[in-house]
Image (tube, rainbow, N blue to C red):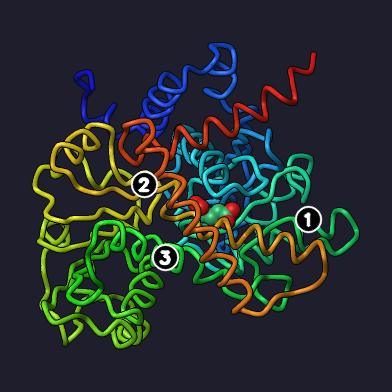
Amino acid sequence: MPNLTLEQEMNPWLAQEARFDIAAQKLNLDPGITKVLRLPVREITVYIPVGMDDGSIEVFTGYRVQHSIARGPGKGGVRYSPSVSLDEVRALASWMTWKCAVVNIPFGGAKGGIVCDPGKMSQAELERMTRRYTAELMEFIGPEKDVPAPDMGTGEQTMAWIMDTYSMHTRQTCTAVVTGKPVNLGGSRGRREATGRGISVVCDEALKHLGLSIDNCRVIVQGFGNVGSNAARILAAKGYRIVGIAEYDGGLYNANGIDISALAEHRKQAGTVNGFRDAEATDKDELLTRACEILIPAATENVITSRNADRLRCRILCEGANGPTTTVADDILADKHIFVIPDILANAGGVTTSYFEWVQDRMGYFWTEDEVNQRLDRIMTDSFRDVLAYAKTHGVHNRIAAYMLAVDRVAYTTRQRGMYA
Ligand code: GLU
């Protein structure tokens, strides 16, 4: 990598672009198609006025970026966070395009975000903001256009509000406009746990591939939100030993394994993982560099960087978050022979089950949790093997293999559809 400032290294859009460029070059991609896929098809910025509980009016900035609709409607979450920026939403939208293509589901890629601090807003304020954001996006979202879903800071309730607002405007109940809804409102069984479950499947596959066994497989998870907590819980049930949990406000370590259900219960009561009795309190950043077989960053972007990558002591890095590793860190990890399961593969279980939700909504017929999980396991296993086969054939590491597989699929469809003029 050329010398980058830390700010450039941490820019998710530049990080996405750098990997895309390598993949495009290795694929010998047509320069015209490269130009098309390098940029999003549409970027929408909305300013959302909201009447706050204290009587004042606040204006929030919201985005929806549709990176590609070549293989199907745009698909991707909506993030509520103070650090949301257009470059971040752009990167996340393009990662959705590549992610959906890696698991071969018929969606393009999109992402949304609102610059806000959901922890400091009331439910009523969040509802008004979500409804107004949805109203501003009426022309751009829809079951055949662009289908939002949860991401950081949003969840089932947010999706219910989006679904209801969209339905009020179209004057018919339209469940397929968003995924990640509550099960009784057209949500899919298994969707809540799906990203964590998908992570567990690719971890199983990685162990098999590397000839390691689940017994004595130590796992450290960063993040105890929807993705991290479900991944930890499902892996523990499969017999993995979760020795560390790093949260934004503290870390926990227990060499004998942390009881994940007890920790979840503690967090529910205390509002934090801190103070949990059956593990020692540790520095959350230092935890990432402790010895383990599998490290799962499942929180946010840019946590494995030029500053700490050389100190990692895991055998496998399984990326539960989107964009947790910078491009500079990619090269360091490759030198250290760490086996990386890249984000666009590792965390694709969520959007895969979102696809199942969309299919079930459109059929009006719902599957059992077992049916959903079996289908998810099969897609994750097949996709893991597809990426590994690509890595072997092209002599590249797993991340570039995943990008190559995805870019090749999207480029093929783009060429086949042709340019409308
Ligand atoms: N926000 C999730 C992701 O980054 C899920 C997106 C979806 O289900 O559409 O993959």
Residue at 54 percent across and 49 percent down: it is: 103
Q: Amino acid at mark 3?
A: Val
Give the Cα separation between the discs numbered 2 and 3: 14 Å
Whether 68 is drawn above or below 416: the answer is: below
Image quadrant in which you'd find residue 68: top right
Name the quarter showing ligand 1. bottom right
Image quadrant in which you'd find residue 107: top right
Image x and y of residue 370, in percent: 59, 79
Badge 1 local density, few (<14 within 10 Å), some, or many (20+)?
many
Q: Earlier in the sequence, mark 2 or mark 3?
A: 3
| The C terminus sits in image quarter | top right
Q: Which residue is mark 1?
A: 166
Q: Are marks 1 and 3 in contact (CB under 8 Å)?
A: no
Q: Amino acid at mark 1?
A: Tyr
Image quadrant in which you'd find residue 360: bottom right
Image x and y of residue 61, in percent: 55, 41
Badge 3 local density, few (<14 within 10 Å), some, or many (20+)?
many
Indicate which label's residue lies in the foreground, 1 or 2: 2
Query: 306 and 63: which one is in front?
Result: 306
Q: Earlier in the sequence, mark 1 or mark 3?
A: 1
- Circle 1: element type: helix
Residue at 65 percent across and 71 percent down: it is: 188
Q: Which residue is mark 3?
A: 201
Q: Are marks 2 and 3 in contact (CB under 8 Å)?
A: no
- Residue 193 lies left or right of residue 205; in this view the side is right
Indicate which label's residue lies in the foreground, 2 or 3: 3
Give the Cα separation between the discs numbered 1 and 3: 35 Å
Q: Which residue is mark 2?
A: 342
Q: Is residue 45 visible?
A: no
